Image: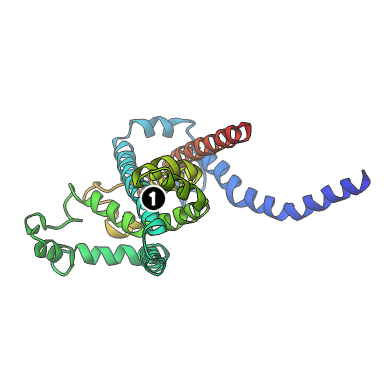
Amino acid sequence: MTTLYKNKKCFALFLLPAVLLVALLIFLPVILNVYYSMFKWTAYSKSMEFVGLKYFQKLFADEKVWHALLNNAKYAVISIVFQVGLALIIAHLLNNFANRRFASMTRVIIFIPAVVSLTAIGLLWVIAYNPSIGFVNPVLEKIGLGAIAHDWLGDSKTAMWSVIMVSQWQYIGEMVMLYTVGLQSVPREIYEAASIDGANGFQTFFQITIPMIKSTILMNTTITIIGAFMVFDEVYVMTSGGPGNATEVLATLMYKTGFRKDNMGYASAIGVLLFVITFIFSFIQMRMYNVKETMKGES
């Protein structure tokens, strides 16, 4: 009993630095952000005026917030299609039908954008979309689509979609790598048995591959959705939320409210909204994963 107590005490001492760091760098900022959202204050104000839930009432009546939230939702939907759906198809094809050397080289090539600086990626595509010196419009003209060539980032109707597609190009390789790890954990014997039973490619994909990597799909979906609502760098570097507020998202709106308009209390309220949204998706993911593990254990 004494030895067990000493072991627990030793484990607690080893965990203490990590617990303190998490509390200091995660929980404390969240608590302080909620606290600051209840005050009217600026970066240079000597005192703060308590306003209670005023900023949260303003939040839900603010058209700019709803517009930014809609842009984040667009970001999430398109990202799910490409980073969850298309990435799974690419990973499946490379894992099951491509030559090993070709598959490895392809994975490396499409993964490279994921490790490049977000600022560099944003600046690269600002140049690429430029109607005068960029390569997007000339490529469209070469393939017979010159009629749709225009200033992609300068047009409020296409700016948001243009920024979204840059993120898909950048992160689809990362999702392919995550799927590859999951796919390679599926026993080859299952595919061989399905082939002997006469199953075709579509049947093995939908009845074997997808069920066997559900946890990976769930994880990638959660990462993608949270990333879509937390997006900042690409939008800020490429458009700064413009033209007008066409590409405004919650993170850029929070930044402008806090550091340009110097309304720190309202910016904190937007930050609380962002935290709540990402927390909900994380909680749903954890609950779904726990339910799945429970059902697996019972079976």
Asked if residue 264 can be seen in this view, the reply is: no
75 to the left or right of 159: right
- According to the picture, the residue beneath numbered tag 1 turns out to be 88
**Element at badge 1?**
helix
Q: Quadrant of residue 134?
A: bottom left
Kind of residue at badge 1:
Leu
**Where is 65 relative to 153, above or below?**
above
Viewer-proximal residue, 30 or 35? 30
Q: Position of residue 185 (x, y in %)?
A: 53, 53
User: Which one is in front, 114 or 263?
Assistant: 114
* 19 versus 51 height, above or below: below
Q: Observer-nearest residue: 106 or 18?
A: 106
Q: Looking at the picture, tell me which residue is in the foreground, 256 or 144.
A: 144
Mark 1 surroundings within 10 Å by alpha-carbon count, few (fewer than 14), some (14 through 19), many (20 or more): many
Q: Position of residue 27 (x, y in %)?
A: 60, 45
Residue 114 lies in what quarter of the image? bottom left
From the viewer's perspective, tell me whether residue 117 is left or right of residue 35: left
Q: Indicate the colouring scheme.
A: rainbow
Measuring 14% from the left and 58% from the top, which residue is drawn there? Answer: 151
Q: Is residue 298 left or right of residue 90?
A: right
Residue 295 % position (x, y): 58, 32
Position of the C terminus, as image quadrant, is top right
